[in-house]
Image: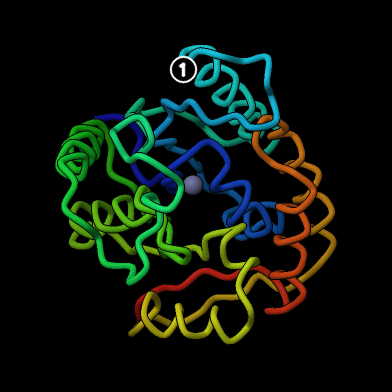
Amino acid sequence: MSRRGEVWLLSPHCDDIAYSLAGRLLSGAERGQHVRLLTIFSQSRFAPYAPTLRSQAQISRWRQAEEARFCDALHLAHECLDLAEAPLRGYPDVDSLFIADGATPEDPELERLEQRLRQRLEQARPARVYAPLGVGGHIDHLLTRRAAQRVFAAICPLLFYEDLPYAGELSAHALAQQLAHTAQGLRPLLTPLADWLPEKLRHLAGYASQVAEKDLAAVATHAHSIGGERVWTLG
Ligand SMILES: [Zn+2]
């Protein structure tokens, strides 16, 4: 059994932790802990702002390198589970990636992901785990949340982060409606707005293959609208 007591950050894709938890990390909320980022669907063909990259192998490698630089900068341990993101699993278009009612659909990948996380548990047990809340309804985010609940709920505390940039693209009313569903029974923990925001935006801009100005604007809008960055937890 290797080291116990790490904090695990479950990131469906290369970028989700930078989007949704960088403020909490930069503000020192997990200071003194060993923090490990696990990128789950790290096989990808999505790199809209890096047109010279063509193959799945090239794009996955490039995006994983962006993630690795972020982890180095924030002193996070990092590993990729190397599952294929939804468009590589037969989801035909962008609309099919987002589930309007937020209910986790049938997808055989859920079982594979649970299996991977249980295998990971055989090596070490986390002290707590962060997973996406599922705002925006991206299928891979919903699967990650469901798998996290099934695998870790009986083992350690779970915290759920508000998914950006999606949460920042919603009106305040639409976000409140989604939270009424996704955060039902949970209480919020706010990382108050501070000088971590420009630093977070700078780190996010490092994901240049996939993050554009409009995405940075959505993150800033959300931070100003809720007064910081937010996670949700039980009790
Ligand atoms: Zn994502």
- Identify residue type, mark 1: Gln
Looking at the image, which is closer to me, 29 or 14? 14
Give the left or right position of residue 34, taking residue 191 as reference.
left
Q: Where is residue 88 in the image (x, y as percent from the top left)?
A: 35, 29
Q: In which quarter of the image is the N terminus?
A: top left
Looking at the image, which is closer to me, 224 or 218? 218
Position of residue 20 relative to residue 107, above or below, is below
Residue 134: name its quadrant: bottom left
Q: What residue sits 35% from the left and 34% below the top? A: 3
Classify mark 1: residues with Cα within 10 Å, few (<14), some (14-19) or many (20+): some
Label 1 CB-ligand 1 distance < 8 A:
no
Looking at the image, which is closer to me, 124 or 131? 131
Tell me which colouring the rendered structure shows.
rainbow
Q: What residue sits 42% from the left and 65% below the top? A: 133
Give the left or right position of residue 51, taking residue 119 as reference.
right
Where disc 1 sits, the SS reads helix
Q: What residue sits 24% from the left and 31% below the top? A: 123
Q: Where is residue 108 in the image (x, y as percent from the top left)?
A: 15, 41
Give the left or right position of residue 200, taking residue 231 as reference.
right
Q: Position of residue 80 (x, y in %)?
A: 41, 27
Write down the residue under mark 1. Answer: 56
Position of residue 115 relative to residue 159, above or below, is above
Q: How many labels does the image show?
A: 1
Give the left or right position of residue 25, taking residue 3 as reference.
right
Q: What residue sits 62% from the left and 51% below the top? A: 19
Position of residue 34 relative to residue 23, above or below, is above
Residue 67: name its quadrant: top right
Looking at the image, which is closer to me, 54 or 76? 54
Q: In which quarter of the image is the C terminus?
A: bottom left
Position of residue 125 relative to residue 25, above or below, is above
